Amino acid sequence: MSVASFVESLHQFLQKDQISENETVREQHSIDESYHKGELTQVVVFPRSTEDTSRILEAASRHAIPVVPFGLGTSLEGHVVPLKECVTIDFMEMNSVLTISPDDLMVTVKPGVTRSQLNRELKKHGLFFSVDPGADATLGGMAATNASGTTSVRYGVMRDQVRDLEVVLASGEVIHTGSKAAKSSAGLHLNGLFVGSEGILGCITELTLKVYGIPEYEMAGRATFPSVENAVQAVVSLLQSGIPIARVELLDEISLKQLNIHQKMSYPEIPTLFMEFHGNEAGLAEDVEFMKEIVAMYNCEAIEFVTDHAERSRLWEARHNLAYSFIHAFPGRKMMVTDVCVPISELAGAVRYAQEKLHELDLIGGVTGHVGDGNFHVILMIDLMNPEEKERANIFNESLVTYGLERNGTSTGEHGVGYGKQKYMHQEFGAALGVMQQIKSALDPQGILNPGKLLPARGDGVNEHVIKS
Ligand SMILES: Cc1cc2nc3c(=O)[nH]c(=O)nc-3n(C[C@H](O)[C@H](O)[C@H](O)COP(=O)(O)OP(=O)(O)OC[C@H]3O[C@@H](n4cnc5c(N)ncnc54)[C@H](O)[C@@H]3O)c2cc1C
């Protein structure tokens, strides 16, 4: 059936301003923040409730129209980029914080709430939500990509925060995947299944999440090292020592240079760890002394601490804006970010390999990363008009993924698969990929949910039509 007859059916239950066929709106919903390209979405719809979403999906199923769920479009692997004729479902109007339960350390939100919006609300109750990707993403999008950030080393990733999701399935049926209990041994782990499913199994319309009390005392600092390898080795030792580190981020020389220019900072342009510790003042004083002894063993050249709230915020804001520092420095170029995650014992070797490869392939890029998790990024700025340079960037990305997979790592620690990393799924999962494809077929037999993303074609029609296009 046609998109036109589908849209006609939407007019029976949505308001006129919930359906947009405006060219600019369609263009804005057909890209993400990366170099990936696709088709133009046909229509953008803006549900205001779970019921709207359910009726949209029920109609999409009846008309066999592909739909792409959309949060803020900050993903980096073509997740929201249409690969064929489709309709985009934007959750921005479902953006209320429904309940905050300080006693249960829990919050229930609609999917369009952004992480900074949630933290503004939580602050009034002395609470915070821990997951902090570098973009101000929506919680629906963050759950759908299993996002993480600078604090994951201490508080875990998105999957660790989800107690319950309300999900609308392809048929329009509404289910809950968990409960409000802190733990449960009942049933299969549907929270885990839907978190990270990139909109291919259902649309998330409500999330119940764990939150935390704002720590009594926080200390942040920068430690500089003669080499990236020294810095990474120091992190491994810090983790082994059991010091309760809340954040530990690596920036190489090139990243610091971009950060200094764009954020008007004057940090030394040498390999640096940005660190943060949470706890009480007396306990932290001891931890920090111990930390100094450890980093000294790895030739740490200097450490500077900040406890003042404004200075600490400036430091982390600078780190969060690092990718944008690169984007501003190279107008006309597009960002390609690698996202390999390896066992921590392999991290130093992986970062060294990445730096050597960058040099060998003569590419512009900086190394940064959530090194406490074994996850690091190389931010490449590529000229899409130069096919030879794009090819070198692809070779770089691919060689890093291969290096990571050969060491029992993963092709993507936090950004997800979209269609950019799909080609690695066979190598990463082997026979388990078949199980994932069967789950997809069972939940979305017509393959209407975000087709062509995450899972490669199975050979039975699901996703296949898209991969060919
Ligand atoms: C500068 C920059 C820095 C970044 N830093 C990090 C980082 O540190 N850590 C990290 O993890 N990521 C990072 N990212 C990637 C990105 O911000 C995350 O992947 C984020 O979780 C995407 O959220 P979004 O709201 O923009 O979702 P979108 O990009 O709109 O969507 C992402 C995926 O989720 C699906 N989706 C969206 N909403 C729903 C829903 N309600 N139900 C079902 N599926 C849905 C979409 O179909 C798509 O597959 C960064 C991106 C940028 C541009």
Image: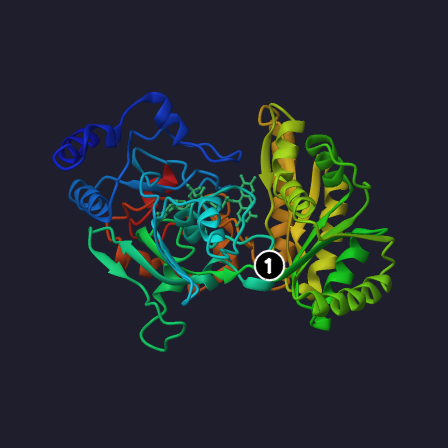
Q: Is mark 1 within 8 Å of ligand 1?
A: no
Please indicate whether residue 178 sits to the left or right of residue 52 in the image.
right
Can you say whether 429 is above or below 223 in the image? below
**Hey, what amino acid is under mark 1?**
Leu
The spot of residue 280 in percent (x, y) is 66, 66
- Which residue is nearer to you in this view: 28 or 303? 303
Image quadrant occupied by the N terminus: top left
**Residue at far left of view:** 12
Please indicate whether residue 95 sits to the left or right of residue 136 in the image.
left
- Which residue is nearer to you in this view: 382 or 89? 89
Can you say whether 106 is above or below 313 in the image? below
Count of marks overlaid on the render: 1
Image quadrant occupied by the C terminus: top left
Task: Answer yes or no: is residue 454 visible.
Answer: no
Q: Rate crowding at label 1 as few (under 14), some (14 to 19) or many (20 or more) other CA atoms within 10 Å.
A: some
Can you say whether 396 is above or below 351 in the image? above
The spot of residue 57 in percent (x, y) is 22, 45
The spot of residue 262 in percent (x, y) is 69, 31
Can you say whether 153 is above or below 2 in the image? below
Residue at x 70% of width, y 59% of height = 347
**Residue at far bottom of view:** 185
- Which residue is nearer to you in this view: 193 or 207? 207
Query: Which image quarter: residue 39?
Result: top left
Please indicate whether residue 353 sits to the left or right of residue 209 in the image.
right
Q: By what rule are the colours in the image chosen?
A: rainbow
- Which residue is nearer to you in this view: 234 or 401? 234
Residue at x 21% of width, y 42% of height = 56
Query: Which image quarter: residue 336?
Result: top right
Task: Answer yes or no: is residue 236 visible.
Answer: yes
Disc 1 target residue: 405
The spot of residue 36 in percent (x, y) is 49, 35
Q: SS at mark 1?
A: helix
